[in-house]
Amino acid sequence: MAGKGIALGNSAAKSENFKKWFTFIILVIGGGTIYKLSSLKDAFYVPMQEFMHLSHTQIGAAMSVYGLVQTIGNVGSIYISDRFSKRTLIPLSLVGIGIVGVYLSTFPSYYGILACWGLFAFFGEVTYWPVLLKAVRLLGNDEEQGRMFGFLEAGRGVVDVIIAFSALGIFALMGKSAGALKGSILFYSAAVIIVGIISYFLIEDDIVVDKDENGNKVNKNVVAMKGVMEAIKTKEIWVVSFTIFSVYSVYCGLTYFIPFLRDIYGMPVTLLGAYGIINQYGLKMIGGPVGGFLVDKKFKSASKYLRVALLVAAISMAVFIMLPHSKMGLYPGMAATLGFGAIIFTMRAVFFAPINEIQVPKHISGAAMSIACIFGYSPSMFAYSLYGSMLDAHPGIAGYRMVFTTMIGFAVLGIIITTILIGMIKKQNKAG
């Protein structure tokens, strides 16, 4: 009888583990499909101009609307992400994006297009992304956080490639016409709606506490606001946010390896596209699992890994600046930039994992992730302009050295912040 009980227990554990990882795969697929419509310009910039009659300025304005809604909306997501269940928010966001995509396929007026990108930002950045991070955090135990976030990033890279190339294939098969662009948009929309429906049946409801310590019924809005205030007052969350800030500031600089290789190494235009794919999708797919493995198996701490990786990044970039670029061949230059990029992608994959290390209570996971998103991703509002202005003001190798030196500065800032974070974690562990 005892043996039978053990067998049943093992069977239940295997079933639960299968469900966990199957749910994780659905979350990854959602994370890889939801942003394809808002990033339509990446694959269909010229068709958007030709068939939707948009100028460069108008496409840029749509992206600005997206950024504005994202920035303002993320403040609200601090409340939303823990007030409503992830089982509601994730499917709603995915299906919402798909419905907006269906409307976009009708090629609405310019103001309709601006509204689409505003809604893409609302569903994708305000009600979805912090909640997805929360769902991933709650899905894994303490020993799996690095791998979970690492595989999330890698998996999204794989889905990015599959979905994007599928849409391009549809566009080509349908004759690269206005109807073909509509077909590609509808493909993106259908994919994200289907994943949203599946998500509803796989993702579990959050347990929302609606009673106080005396067992009295309390308003859920009051509970959510108390959670927001608790998260805002938790200084460790802010330190994690600025850790992400420092890594993301360095990450933004990777974009400028492409013009660097063109201007300094004379990279042919035909190679630039291939390099760009490797630099983004390829490194994302490699960096995610590597970063997750190092965090969980070697360092046993995301914060400690980030500190070491930032140190390696700072030293590597200092060495890179001193290389004789004018005498080096193109392929050594490509290898050096991709090697540096790989280091950054291992960090980008796991820089939300410290949320678990600082022992953030599960009931404020969403608020914590929202705060981390607001400040962690804020370099996107200034870093590209900062780096670009350096290159415009100082053409040639001098401008690139300034950019790369600034990236070192952000890496050093990250080393300081992660050191503070590690000290906080040690104090928490002693107190606990």
Image (cartoon, rainbow, N blue to C red):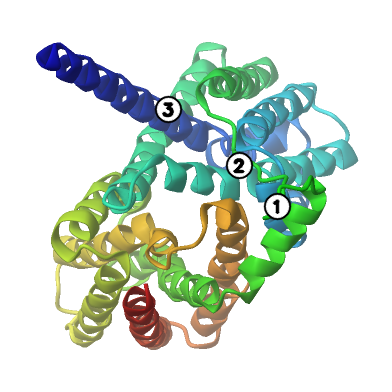
Q: Amino acid at mark 2?
A: Lys
Q: Picture quarter containing residue 38?
A: top right
Q: Residues within 10 Å of mark 1 (few under 14, many from 20)?
A: some
The quadrant of the rendering that contains the C terminus is bottom left
Q: Residues within 10 Å of mark 2 (few under 14, many from 20)?
A: some
**Camera-side residue: 388 or 192?**
192
Q: Position of residue 134 (x, y in %)?
A: 52, 48
Residue that badge 3 annotates: 23
| Element under disc 1 | helix
Disc 2 vs disc 3: which is toward the camera? 3
Q: Position of residue 35 (x, y in %)?
A: 58, 39
217 sits to left or right of 317: right
Q: Which mark is residue 41?
A: 2
330 sits to left or right of 154: left
Q: Earlier in the sequence, mark 1 or mark 2?
A: 2
CB contact under 8 Å: marks 1 and 2: yes
- The residue sitting at the left extreme is 3
Report, in whole angstroms, how far the alpha carbon at label 1 lies from the one at label 3: 31 Å
Disc 1 vs disc 2: which is toward the camera? 1
Q: Earlier in the sequence, mark 1 or mark 3?
A: 3
Identified at 80% across, 21% down, the residue is: 106
Residue that badge 1 annotates: 63
| Element under disc 2 | helix
Q: Earlier in the sequence, mark 2 or mark 3?
A: 3
Q: Picture quarter containing residue 192?
A: top right
Q: Residues within 10 Å of mark 3 (few under 14, many from 20)?
A: many
Report, in whole angstroms, how far the alpha carbon at label 2 lies from the one at label 3: 30 Å
